[in-house]
């Protein structure tokens, strides 16, 4: 398969590039500047410079039309850091520009990296949350609420795009730990290895039945393949649960 990954210089994207390239897939890494070129090329990726903040929809469309990917991965994000306007420009407006460009370029398959607990808070806590998860949710929204709100707005927009064949993966607090076992589906808040996110993205890309699902992804006790099979067979959807 051929992938175009936005946020191509990020840690999740770098893990994905290494893993996917090692399995014979082609990965185009969209980055803001050339500072990551040598590293990404050493992992088997092909860097492509384009700022998601500054690019227009036609420019992104041209990039997708030139590379003709089988799937797009959106893992770009400001992370709630720096100028607050960057969060809106990257996590919401940048995502919507990619959605628009995918439709214009007739590229349908999207793997989108969201975040656990992205939701409409006016509806209350998800039914399955423990008190610990509720407390963690409040702490996260108080700390990086602008980021969480931008991610929520982007996912609302994504779920309205009937032409896109999307899978949303929602990790918890991202860590640098090696990928281990996992839990997928409806999860409590927790931690997620960045390398695990990368492996799960590739697994979802290879599983057409994951299309249309929003899937929580945490470090856990299950095998990735078994957890993904459970989710797709039972159609466990974490969106606005």
Image (cartoon, rainbow, N blue to C red):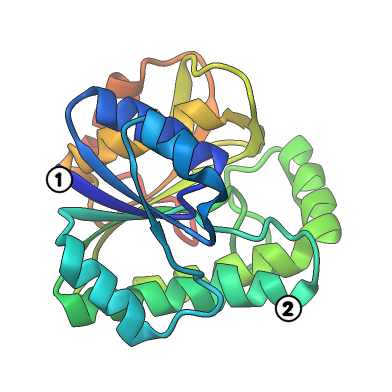
Whether label 1 touches label 2, CB < 8 Å: no
- Secondary structure category for the residue under label 2: helix
* Residue visible at 27% across and 70% down in the picture: 63
Q: Is residue 230 visible?
A: no
- Tag 2 or tag 1, which sits nearer the N-term? 2
Residue 191 in the image: above or below residue 127: above
Residue 193 left/right relative to 70: right
Give the camera-side residue of 122 and 99: 99
Check disc 1 and report the residue beneath it.
Answer: 208
Query: In the image, is 195 to the left or to the right of 168?
Result: right
Q: Is residue 15 in view?
A: yes
Q: Quadrant of residue 40?
A: top left
Q: Quadrant of residue 175?
A: top right
Residue at the disc numbered 2: 85
Disc 1 vs disc 2: which is toward the camera? Answer: 2
Residue at the location (24% across, 29% down)? Answer: 229
Q: Position of residue 87 (x, y in %)?
A: 68, 70
For the image shown, how many numbered marks are present on the structure? 2
Seen from the viewer's position, the closer of residues 29 and 42 is 42
Q: Residue 162's x, y, as percent?
A: 22, 76
């Amino acid at each position: 398969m051929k992938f175009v990954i936005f946020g191509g210089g990020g840690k999740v994207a770098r893990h994905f590039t290494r893993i996917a390239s090692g399995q014979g897939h082609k990965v185009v890494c969209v980055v803001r500047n050339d500072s990551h070129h040598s590293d990404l090329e050493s992992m088997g990726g092909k860097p492509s410079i384009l700022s998601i903040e500054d690019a227009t929809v036609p420019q992104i469309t041209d990039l997708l039309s030139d590379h003709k990917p089988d799937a797009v991965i959106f893992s770009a994000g400001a992370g709630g850091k720096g100028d607050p306007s960057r969060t809106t420009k990257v996590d919401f407006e940048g995502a919507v520009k990619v959605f628009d460009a995918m439709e214009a370029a007739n590229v349908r398959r999207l793997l989108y990296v969201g975040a656990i607990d992205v939701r409409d808070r006016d509806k209350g806590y998800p039914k399955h949350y423990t008190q610990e998860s509720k407390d963690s949710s409040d702490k996260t929204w108080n700390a990086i609420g602008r980021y969480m709100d931008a991610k929520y707005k982007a996912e609302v927009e994504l779920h309205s795009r009937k032409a896109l064949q999307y899978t949303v993966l929602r990790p918890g607090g991202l860590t640098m730990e090696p990928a281990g076992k996992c839990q997928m589906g409806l999860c409590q808040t927790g931690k997620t290895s960045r390398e695990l996110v990368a492996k799960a993205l590739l697994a979802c890309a290879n599983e057409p039945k994951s299309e249309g699902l929003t899937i929580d992804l945490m470090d856990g006790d299950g095998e990735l393949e078994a957890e993904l099979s459970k989710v797709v067979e039972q159609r466990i959807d974490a969106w606005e649960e």
